[in-house]
Amino acid sequence: MLFATRTLAAASARAFSTSAAQNAAKVAVLGAAGGIGQPLSLLLKANPAISHLSLYDLFNTPGVAADLSHINTPAKVTGFLPDNEGLKQTLEGAQIVVIPAGVPRKPGMSRDDLFNTNAGIVRDLATACAQYCPKAHVLVIANPVNSTVPIVAEVFKKHNVFDPRRVFGVTTLDVVRASRFVSENQDTNPADTNITVVGGHSGVTIIPLFSQTPGLKLNESDLKALTHRIQYGGDEVVKAKNGGGSATLSMAYAGARFTNSLLDATVNGKKGIIEPTYVKSDVLAKEGVEYFSTKVELGPNGVEKIHGLGELSAHEQALLKEAIPELKKNIQKGYDFAHKTE
Ligand code: NAD
Ligand code: LMR
């Protein structure tokens, strides 16, 4: 009965359709019924550069799709479940795939504690992407990002479809937080408070580079407090939600910002679009770090140019030194997982 209801609901969700815009992309969201997936899909529905918003989850996507499909923006919205080759239908023709599918933290957990559950989810979804939309840009939100991005890359390599310009770890929330926290501290407008954040997406691997913001002068205690707050901002939300999950709304905002920037570069042909993102990178090749987040210029094929670290203060050099072994461990863990079933 449940199966029949879902099948019917999926079929009716497929029927929802508005006319597709020209020069616009099909964007798939995997994990679309979740805490991030729903508000992220809502924000994406507003972007006219999306012709088709294709939602996938283990439950409730037909309902979410039906709801979003009433919003008077061009994107057609469809919702699929695992039955009836739902994942295949979700992914076929997608130019961008955003992956917030996976379990969130509870108080006391690290992001790495999510690895055992989320690594398999991401591997399986990446396998489907490699099969059904091998040229899509894949935006990984599921934690631990430091490890899940290498998993996606290795799965794509196995299928001979890996293009390092098209696999991204979404670290945008770290710069969104940095901007907000520093603007609170400095009494400035967050819109004009741009803070470079490099590294990875967990604790010590998150490295704010305050010295690169012109005119920003922080005293020693603010420097330490803000660095800690940016590195552990996720914990604040996990603690406040008290077992109810981690950041969803701010993440949806950050995920939409990154997706919209990529759409600007790929669909709207805009130049000079720069976002921080965790990608395969040579910035720390000498140290043996294969994936790293710095500012990245986006272009029609995804990564156009990876910016270097720039000049670092002594404080920032110390943070980088601390981050490197943790990042290497996280990357290796993802790599080993992707290869262990060979
Ligand atoms: P959630 O539990 O609210 O939603 C996750 C959704 O994924 C659920 O609806 C679930 O059904 C779905 N799902 C699970 N397995 C799936 C599969 N195999 N296929 C499709 N869908 C599947 O969790 P959330 O709060 O949305 O967080 C999702 C992930 O995002 C977590 O891993 C979290 O740690 C991570 N996250 C990352 C960042 C970041 O900055 N990159 C920020 C916040 C959260
Ligand atoms: C965040 O930074 O908010 C996310 O990575 C979720 C988490 O577990 O903290």
Image (cartoon, helix red, strand yellow):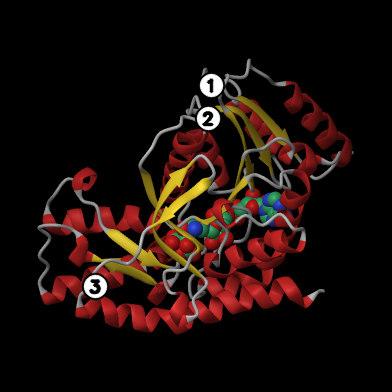
Residue matched to label 2: 45
Distance in Å between CA atoms under marks 1 and 2: 8 Å
Distance in Å between CA atoms under marks 2 and 3: 39 Å
- Circles 1, 2 touching at the beta carbon (< 8 Å): yes
Q: Which amino acid does label 3 sit on?
A: Leu
- Give ligand 1's quarter of the image: bottom right
Residue matched to label 3: 312
Label 2 SS = helix
Q: Which of 290 and 71 is in front in this view?
A: 290
Q: Nearer the viewer, residue 303 or 275?
A: 303
Q: What residue type is labelled 1?
A: Ile
Q: Is mark 3 within 8 Å of ligand 2?
A: no
Residue matched to label 1: 71
The earlier-in-sequence mark between 2 and 3 is 2
Tell whether 304 sits left or right of 21: left
Q: Nearer the viewer, residue 87 or 211?
A: 211
Which labelled disc corresponds to residue 200? none
Residue 53 can be seen in this image: yes
Observer-side mark, 1 or 2, equals 2
Q: Position of residue 163 (x, y in %)?
A: 62, 54
Tell whether 277 sits left or right of 25: left
Q: Nearer the viewer, residue 152 or 246?
A: 152
Label 1 SS = loop
Q: Which amino acid does label 2 sit on?
A: Lys
Decide: few, some or many residues near mark 1? Use Cα within 10 Å; few <14, some 14-19, many ≥20: some
The earlier-in-sequence mark between 1 and 2 is 2
